[in-house]
Amino acid sequence: MSMVDLIMPKLGESIMEATILKWHKKPGDKVEQDETVLDIATDKVDSEVPSVAEGIITEILFKENDVVPIGSVIAKIDTGVETGQTENIKKSVSSPQYEDANVVEEVPYQPEEKKSTGNGSFGIRFYSPLVLNIAASEGISMSELEHMEGTGQDGRVSKKDIMAYLEDRKNAPQHKQAEPTHTTEVQELPAETSKHEYQAPTIFSGNVEIIEMDRMRKMIAKHMIDSQNTSAHVTSFIECDVTNLVLWREKVKKDFEKREGEKITYTPLFIEAVVKCIKKYPLINSSVDVDRIIVKKDINIGMATAMPSGNLIVPVIKNADQLNLTGLAKQVNGLANSARNNKLNPGDTAGGTFTLTNVGTFGSLMGTPIINQPQVAIMAVGAIKKRPVVIETEQGDSIAIRHMMFISLSYDHRIIDGSLGSIFLSAVAKELENFDGKRSL
């Protein structure tokens, strides 16, 4: 019998875990090589995981909605089992956790972790999504979870542990509230203790609508908070005259679409300017590894793209410095269409070294974007507006109607100081302002 492990694939440099959305196979099912076994999701993209070999699924190690570390074994495939033995395998590997969706056991694999000492100095503990959901609905705080005894592997808290805890809490004798005395002073628990130890779901008054976050929105929220906690964010702004660029695009867009079958938007023009400036200031195209600076030689530009659901995803244009304007336009359009139709592959969102977001698409003049980890900078371009501005000519200053745009750059102040951030931002603005309005396609 030859066993092959199905591994949770690596989905990008900054992605350390993925959520299992759906299993397409169950223990005992036959699977072909490259046939889809399960669907997974990260904070960036949903994806399918294919089988690495032909055989029989003998064991599934995680359940739907489990969050699984990258590199974990998620299933086992027997490549030496005859098709006729399928029914026997189904019987031998069947267990209540696959037959009853309401029964959830602890997962058999987790990274090495520290157990809670119970004395207030806590290590990192794993809690399954079911346990966390029960805790949230019953008002059990993280502090209570940390003190809870677990019977699962490595002391983890299982469903039966938390249900037993709730039963004990329910049956515990309640302290009767003392009758009021002549004094009007009422002794209460400190606000902080009450908040952390007895936190209950918030009750909202008035006319409200409560909307549960979808999975992607929860992941985006976590990704943004993690970025703020990782990088020392600083944002610089500059105003840019893009009149030459706007007029050139208006002049060539019909011919470009006719010739290439693609529309030319402003995004490839912005990316072209960014790439030129990254070559001049390569530290912008780097990441931080503890106390080391990793300067990336490849220039892979992520472009923030809004999805129909309202969520945001960042597909990546690989080796953008090796593409001409036509190549950039085709890459931008192709990735944007795939994102909007939920057709992106894991590789389409991996490996970004710098991100561009166009907040002007929705009418904003400027923005303060959050860095897309593990990158160290992200640029936002605002809406292009016609405004009267003072321009310098050989005949002196004059007022003219120009197409103006604000650009902002958020950067990681751990390695990028204000001088470099501002110099890079000014360089991008100059590239756009000095755009050759007579260039040919």
Image (tube, grey):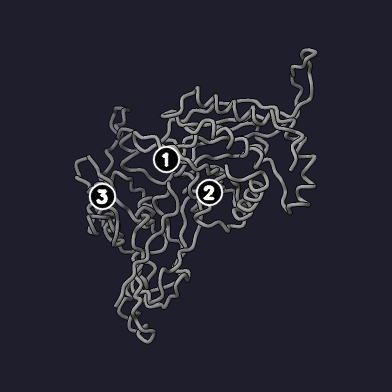
**Tag 1, which secondary structure?**
helix
How far across and down, in percent of the image, does residue 349 sit? 51, 50
> Residue lying furthest top in this view?
396
Residue 30 is situated, as x and y percent measured from the top left of the image, at 42, 78
Q: Is residue 25 above or below residue 192?
A: below
Compare marks 3 and 1 and give the one earlier in the sequence.
3
Q: At label 3, which amino acid type do we have?
A: Glu
Residue at horizontal 58 percent and vertical 30 percent from the top: 408
* Viewport quadrant of the N terminus: bottom left
Within 10 angstroms of label 2, few (less than 14), some, or many (20 or more) residues? few
Relative image position of residue 238 (x, y in whole percent): 61, 25
Q: Quadrant of the C terminus?
A: top right
Local packing at callout 3 (Cα closer than 10 Å; few below 14, some 14-19, many 20+) is: few
- Of marks 3 and 2, the one in the foreground: 3
- Asked if disc 3 and disc 2 are in contact, CB closer than 8 Å, the reply is no
Query: What SS does tag 3 mark?
Result: loop
Residue 388, given in percent of the width and then of the height, sits at: 76, 22
* Label 2 sits on residue: 210
Q: Earlier in the sequence, mark 3 or mark 2?
A: 3
Mark 3 and mark 1: Cα distance apart in space: 20 Å
**For the residue labelled by badge 2, is the local secondary structure a helix, a strand or a loop?**
loop
The disc label shown at residue 226, or none: 1
Mark identifier at residue 113: 3
Report how many numbered discs are placed on residues in the image. Answer: 3
Q: Nearer the viewer, residue 414 or 146?
A: 414
Q: Is residue 339 above or below residue 366?
A: below
Labelled pair 3, 1 in contact (Cβ < 8 Å): no
Q: Earlier in the sequence, mark 2 or mark 1?
A: 2
- Looking at the rendered structure, the kind of residue marked 2 is Ile
Specify the farthest residue to the bottom: 84
- Amino acid carrying label 1: it is Asp
